[in-house]
Image (tube, rainbow, N blue to C red):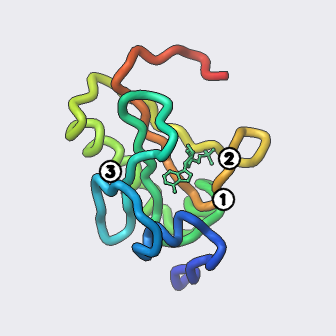
């Protein structure tokens, strides 16, 4: 399947296209990682596919290799940030507090994390 076209209303597609600013910390052919604008920890980076899929499940269906790239990138980000450990989270669906419907992996660390999350 061909990659989906960018969604003109999607803020993360605009970051991929360079149309709005973001603090990019890592980029590959398939993904981009940038700092969350409202960080929940000293390190809070979002790793996103360049292609627009509304959530991780849709990404897994259509581009499983890109889904793997997001986790490889998460590890690279964690190493670059010197994290002892990190949490990698996909919120999927509004009921799980997903607010941006372009798949994104939260990479959170740099402080003692609690479990379970709220
Ligand atoms: P979620 O609630 O899982 O959909 O996460 C969306 C995340 O995107 C939130 O943590 C927001 O703070 C973050 N966010 C929204 N807009 C931007 C932006 N322009 N640049 C960086 N992070 C953003």
Height in image: 1 above or below 13? below
Check if mark 2's residue and mark 1's residue have beta carbons within 8 Å: yes
| Residue positioned 32% across, 50% down in the render | 73
- Residue drawn at 50 percent across, 31 percent down: 40
106 sits to left or right of 53? left
Count of all numbered marks drawn on residues in the image: 3
**Quadrant in which the N terminus is drawn:** bottom right
Q: Earlier in the sequence, mark 3 or mark 2?
A: 3
Compared across the picture, whether 92 is left or right of 89 comes to right
Extreme front residue here? 21
Q: Nearer the viewer, mark 1 or mark 3?
A: 1
How far, Cα to Cα, is label 1 from label 3?
20 Å
Q: Residues within 10 Å of mark 3 (few under 14, many from 20)?
A: many
Label 2 CA crowd tier, 10 Å (few <14, some 14–19, many 20+) = some
Residue 113's spot in the image, x, y percent? 46, 18
Residue holding disc 3: 73
Element at label 3 = helix
Q: Which residue is mark 2?
A: 98
Q: Residue furthest right?
A: 95
Query: In the rendered image of this protein, does residue 9 appear above or below residue 118?
Result: below
Circle 1 — which element? loop
Question: Is the residue marked 2 within 8 Å of ligand 1, measured from its CB?
Answer: yes
Callout 3: CB less than 8 Å from ligand 1: no
- Label 2's element? loop
Above or below, 72 against 60 in this view is above
Can you give x and y, in whole percent of width and height, for residue 4 in the image? 57, 80
Q: Is mark 1 within 8 Å of ligand 1?
A: yes
The alpha-carbon separation of the residues under discs 3 and 2 comes to: 21 Å
Q: Is residue 64 above or below residue 98?
A: below
Residue 98 x %, y %? 68, 46
Q: Who's the residue at 71% across and 40% down the image?
A: 97
Q: Nearer the viewer, mark 3 or mark 2?
A: 2
């Amino acid at each position: 399947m061909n990659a989906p076209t960018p969604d003109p209303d999607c803020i993360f597609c605009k970051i991929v296209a360079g149309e709005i600013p973001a603090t990019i910390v890592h980029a590959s052919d398939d993904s981009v990682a940038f700092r969350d604008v409202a960080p929940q920890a000293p390190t809070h980076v979002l790793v996103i596919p360049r292609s627009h899929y509304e959530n991780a499940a849709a990404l897994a269906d259509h581009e499983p290799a890109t889904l793997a790239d997001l986790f490889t990138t998460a590890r690279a980000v964690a190493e670059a940030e010197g994290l002892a450990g990190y949490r990698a989270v996909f919120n999927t669906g509004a009921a799980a507090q997903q607010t941006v419907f372009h798949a994104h992996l939260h990479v959170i660390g740099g402080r003692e994390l609690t479990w379970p999350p709220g």
